[in-house]
Image: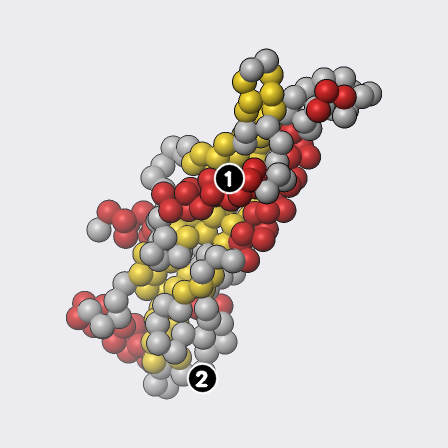
C-alpha cells in the first residue's frame, strides 16, 4: 500500500518530499450493553438490542469524524491533513433467537499534532453523553442497575504511536534536507529541492520521535 501523506501528492517538477512528521494513531473500545431476552418478542419489557445501539454509535462516529480538525503542517503544503475516526469492527450477539445482551465497537482514531489520546477519549465520552441526552441511546436496566455504553482506550503491548512534527528551520533538519537534496540531484542528474511533508499513517518512527 503506498504511503498516504505529502509524499503521495504530485509535487512540482524538481521537488521531492521528505517526511518530517507523522500523524498518531490510537484505538478505542466501546462496550455496549443490551438487555437480552427472547428474540421472538424483542420489544417486550423495553428490551434493548446491543447491536442496534452499537449501530447508532457507529453512525454517530461517522459524523463526528467529519467534524474533526485539519492541519496544514508547512507553508505551501499541497495537502491538508485531517484527524479522523473510523469504526473498524463491531461484534455482538450469538446468532440465536435472543436479544443481543452485549456488543463491542473498535474505533481507530488518527491524531494530528496538538491532539492527544486523552483529548480524543474525552471527545468520544462527550459523544456518547450527547447521544444519551438526545434520547438516541437506551440504557440497559437489570434490577435497579442501568448500564450505558462506555468507551476506553484499547490496550496494546507496545507504546502508543503519538503524532509528531519536526521544525524544518532547525539547523540539524535544515542541514539534513540539504544533504538529501544534494544526493537526489546527483541521482536525477538535475537540481532537486526537498519539500517537507507529513505522513497521515503511522510508522515505527512515531515511537522513536516520542522517545527523542
Q: Is residue 88 visible?
A: no
Residue highlighted by disc 1: 129
Q: Is residue 43 left or right of residue 68?
A: right
To which quarter of the image does residue 76 belong? bottom left
- Whether residue 131 is situated above or below residue 35 in the rendered picture: below
Horizontal and vertical percent position of residue 42: 77, 24
Q: Earlier in the sequence, mark 2 or mark 1?
A: 2
Q: Nearer the viewer, residue 131 or 87?
A: 131
Q: Is residue 42 left or right of residue 134?
A: right
Horizontal and vertical percent position of residue 27: 46, 41
Q: Confirm or deny contact between disc 2 and disc 1 (CB under 8 A).
A: no
- At horizontal 54% and vertical 24% (from top left) the residue drawn is 147
- At horizontal 58% and vertical 53% (from top left) the residue drawn is 63
For mark 2, does the 10 Å Cα neighbourhood hold few (<14), some (14 to 19), or many (20 or more) residues? few
Horizontal and vertical percent position of residue 185: 34, 80
For mark 1, does the 10 Å Cα neighbourhood hold few (<14), some (14 to 19), or many (20 or more) residues? some
Q: What distance separates the C-alpha of mark 2 from that of mark 1? A: 50 Å
Secondary element at tag 2: loop
Horizontal and vertical percent position of residue 62: 59, 51
Residue highlighted by disc 2: 13
To which quarter of the image does residue 18 belong? bottom left
- At horizontal 32% and vertical 47% (from top left) the residue drawn is 207
- Which of pointers 2 and 1 indicates the residue nearer the eye? 1
Amino acid at each position: 500500500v503506498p504511503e498516504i501523506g505529502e509524499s503521495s501528492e504530485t509535487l512540482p517538477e524538481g521537488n521531492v518530499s521528505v517526511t518530517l512528521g507523522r500523524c498518531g494513531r490510537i484505538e478505542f473500545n466501546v462496550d455496549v450493553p443490551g438487555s437480552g431476552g427472547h428474540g421472538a418478542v424483542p420489544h417486550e419489557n423495553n428490551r434493548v438490542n446491543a447491536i442496534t445501539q452499537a449501530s447508532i454509535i457507529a453512525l454517530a462516529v461517522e459524523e463526528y469524524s467529519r467534524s474533526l480538525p485539519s492541519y496544514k503542517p508547512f507553508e505551501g503544503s499541497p495537502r491538508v491533513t485531517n484527524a479522523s475516526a473510523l469504526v473498524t469492527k463491531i461484534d455482538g450477539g450469538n446468532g440465536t433467537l435472543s436479544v443481543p445482551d452485549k456488543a463491542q465497537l473498535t474505533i481507530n482514531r488518527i491524531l494530528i499534532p496538538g491532539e492527544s489520546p486523552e483529548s480524543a477519549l474525552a471527545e468520544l465520552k462527550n459523544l456518547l453523553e450527547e447521544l444519551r441526552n438526545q434520547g438516541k441511546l437506551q440504557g440497559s436496566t437489570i434490577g435497579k442497575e442501568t448500564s450505558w455504553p462506555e468507551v476506553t482506550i484499547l490496550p496494546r503491548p507496545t507504546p502508543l504511536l503519538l503524532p509528531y512534527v519536526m521544525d524544518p528551520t532547525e539547523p540539524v533538519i535544515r542541514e539534513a534536507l540539504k544533504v538529501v537534496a544534494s544526493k537526489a540531484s546527483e541521482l536525477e542528474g538535475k537540481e532537486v529541492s526537498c519539500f517537507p511533508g507529513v505522513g497521515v499513517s503511522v510508522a515505527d518512527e512515531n515511537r522513536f520521535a516520542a522517545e527523542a
